[in-house]
Image: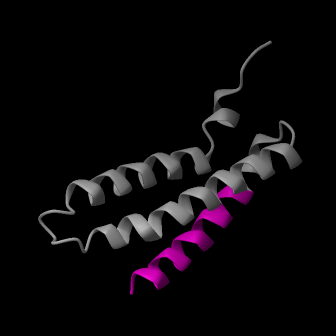
Amino acid sequence: MKKNWVYIISPCIIALIALIVGIIESLFDAHSSQGWSIIGVMVGVPFFILIIGIDFLLKMAIKRNVILLWSVEIILIIICFFFFRKFRG
């Protein structure tokens, strides 16, 4: 069975990697920011869970249609980005 890497490494997976980097960076900056960067973790973790759920549900609903999967995930990530920006202030 041939694996379709474009299907596996979808926009949600790329967003998860970026979110993990942001959460780790916030954790390392916690001491120098006197705890304020923990807010980044508190906001990032729910979005992490949301994006994992979106990725799982879309991959269950959209079977092997890579173009549709990427299109829907990009639109949903843009919507999540605007909500994330709204929560950050």
Is residue 68 visible in the rendered structure shown here? Answer: no
Applied colour scheme:
one colour
Kindly identify the residue that appears in the image at 43 percent across and 69 percent down: 42
**From the viewer's perspective, is 41 left or right of 70?**
left
Instruction: Please say whether residue 55 is visible from this viewpoint.
Output: yes
Range shown magenta: 72-89
Residue drawn 39% across the image and 87% down it: 89
Tell me: 48 left or right of 88. right
The image position of residue 6, as x and y in percent, is 65, 34
The foreground one among 77 and 35 is 35
**Name of the residue lying farthest toward the left:** 32
Q: Where does residue 62 sit, x and y in percent of width and height?
A: 85, 46
Whether 36 is drawn above or below 21: the answer is: below
Front-lying residue, 12 or 33: 33
Please give the name of the residue rendered at 68% of the width and 56% of the height, measured from the top-left corner: 73
Tell me: 22 left or right of 85: left
Query: How far from the left and from the top, in percent, is residue 17?
Result: 46, 46
Q: Is residue 31 above or below residue 28?
A: below
Q: Does the stretch in magenta take in 26?
A: no
Q: Is residue 61 left or right of residue 42?
A: right
The quarter of the picture where residue 19 lies is bottom left
Quadrant holding the N terminus:
top right
Of residues 84 and 45, which is closer to you in this image?
A: 45
**What x and y, as percent, mark residue 45?**
49, 61
